[in-house]
Image (cartoon, helix red, strand yellow):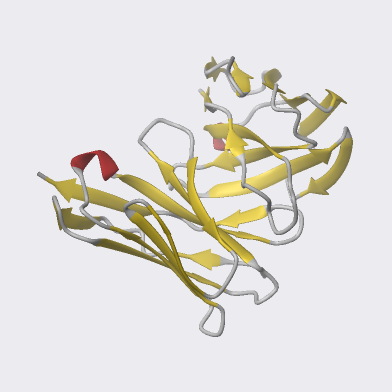
Amino acid sequence: QKEVEQNSGPLSVPEGAIASLNCTYSDRGSQSFFWYRQYSGKSPELIMFIYSNGDKEDGRFTAQLNKASQYVSLLIRDSQPSDSATYLCAAFYGQNFVFGPGTRLSVLP
Amino acid sequence: DTAVSQTPKYLVTQMGNDKSIKCEQNLGHDTMYWYKQDSKKFLKIMFSYNNKELIINETVPNRFSPKSPDKAHLNLHINSLELGDSAVYFCASSQEVGQGGYGYTFGSGTRLTVV
């Protein structure tokens, strides 16, 4: 069974700190991983994706992938209150994405 | 110039009724999806169409029937609505260029409440 797991949180960090969001996946068949942000009452929006082992940086966001450990993470530097949302990790399995339950992040001013 | 549009945004209906949700995308994507997001925020795939052909049909009650008249539209019809059908339904589209391409573009969602 293809599963994606995340700590549901809430994860609370002070403004300006680094927020670290983690995700594990059960099936090694997935080769690509995506992070989405969902504000309350809104639809998910893509933040970034990663295919290769290692780090990928985009502005304040860094995605990290370790295929041997089946582990994906998202780091948000200089966290802002506007980053407060639910972050969904998704693994692509050939025809569709399997989503994790999301981690709720709260950035405190 | 909305990329993926769903209607209606809110739908409140009584048990036993039949209802439809419409979805249209103007991105030229080949693949469209229906996902259900329950109260715990879990997004689960229901159906997927690629160029009007059904390619994914997860374990969903047969009261749910998707219909894709062309590759820009994917509608969802639900018969005999039950209380447990209450959720947010998201339409999405993608243009995969291997390995999931650039991900999904989601519609704004339809909040269905069955009373």
Relative image position of residue A38 (x, y in whole percent): 41, 41
Taking the spot 66% from the left edge, 47% from the top edge, the residue there is B45
Q: Residue furthest left?
A: A109
Residue B61 appears anywhere in the view: no
Which quadrant holds residue B17?
A: top right
Does the image show residue B35?
yes
Tell me if A66 is positioned left or right of B24 in this view. Answer: left
Q: Is residue A19 left or right of residue B111?
A: left
In the picture shown, does residue A8 fall above or below B15?
below
- Residue closer to the observer: A55 or A29: A55
Q: Quadrant of the N terminus of chain B?
A: top right
Report x, y in % for residue A46.
50, 44
- Can you give x and y, in whole percent of width and height, for residue A51 in the image? 60, 65
Q: Is B105 above or below relative to A25? A: above
Q: Is residue A15 left or right of residue B73?
A: left
Q: Is residue B113 above or below residue A30?
A: above
Depth check, front residue: A95 or B64? A95
Query: Does A60 sit left or right of A5 as displayed?
Result: left
Q: Residue at x 53, y 41 (%)?
A: B37
Q: Quadrant of residue B67?
A: top right
Residue positioned 68% across, 50% down in the render: B101
Q: Residue at x 50, y 42 (%)?
A: B38
* B100 lies above or below B13: below
